[in-house]
Image (cartoon, grey):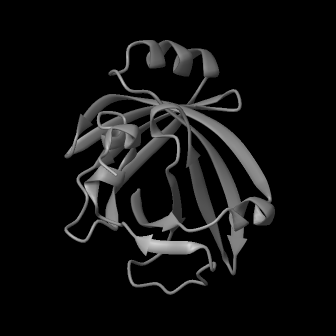
């Protein structure tokens, strides 16, 4: 129930041709408090509710509990989520023994593309695709919960 993850900006569209799968994601937040984020997610007719704890100081590790719920339950919960629903297309790309999840954001976060990789250990090495750019692990403005409140389209370029 511990999530270890690193995040990167993406520098090109090369990930699209390397993806072995794609999934549309709609998600909202019942709580965006940094110590306890509660997310509702709907993906291809599957629903999930996820509770995440406070991130460690370097931003890589935190408690995560996720439970699958019905799509009807997810749709109902999305109706009562805080303002600022996230819409994105996730591309799954194999990279060595890992899968990189590349999120191409839509709506208020259009233009933002972030790659995430889940690890077994915080200092684990992995094969980095050439299109991985600047690491943004631990930068709160790139957390989905924060993008729901302060979308990419409102950032000063």
Using the image, determine if residue 128 lies above or below residue 31: below
**Is 6 positioned to the left or the right of 17 in the image?**
left
Q: Residue at x 29, y 51 (%)?
A: 141
**Is 156 positioned to the left or the right of 91 in the image?**
left
| Number of marks in the rendered image | 0
- Residues 36 and 82: in front is 82
Q: Quadrant of residue 32?
A: top left
Instruction: Tell me residue 155's x, y (percent).
Output: 31, 45
**Is 59 positioned to the left or the right of 109 in the image?**
left
- Residues 48 and 115: in front is 115
Instruction: Tell me residue 38's x, y (percent).
Output: 34, 35
On-image quarter of the N terminus = bottom left
- Residues 154 and 5: in front is 154
**Is 83 positioned to the left or the right of 94 in the image?**
left
Using the image, determine if residue 132 lies above or below residue 71: below
Instruction: Tell me residue 68's x, y (percent).
Output: 56, 34
Using the image, determine if residue 52 lies above or below residue 10: above
Using the image, determine if residue 48 lies above or below residue 93: above
Q: Residue at x 63, y 80 (%)?
A: 130
Q: Residue at x 66, y 37 (%)?
A: 24
Instruction: Tell me residue 137's x, y (percent).
Output: 35, 66
Q: Residue at x 61, y 66 (%)?
A: 100
């Amino acid at each position: 129930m511990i999530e270890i993850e690193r995040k990167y900006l993406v520098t090109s569209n090369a990930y699209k041709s390397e993806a072995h799968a794609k999934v549309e994601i709609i998600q909202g937040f019942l709580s965006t408090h940094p110590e306890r984020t509660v997310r509702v997610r709907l993906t291809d007719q599957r629903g999930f509710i996820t509770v995440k704890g406070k991130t460690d100081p370097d931003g890589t590790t935190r408690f995560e509990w996720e439970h699958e719920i019905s799509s009807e339950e997810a749709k109902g919960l999305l109706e009562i989520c805080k303002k600022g629903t996230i819409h994105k297309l996730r591309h799954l790309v194999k990279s060595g023994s890992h899968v990189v999840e590349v999120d191409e954001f839509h709506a208020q976060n259009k233009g933002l593309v972030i790659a995430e990789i889940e690890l077994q250990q915080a200092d684990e090495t992995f094969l980095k695709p050439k299109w991985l750019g600047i690491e943004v692990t631990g930068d709160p403005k790139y957390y989905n919960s924060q993008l729901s409140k302060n979308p990419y389209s409102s950032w000063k370029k």
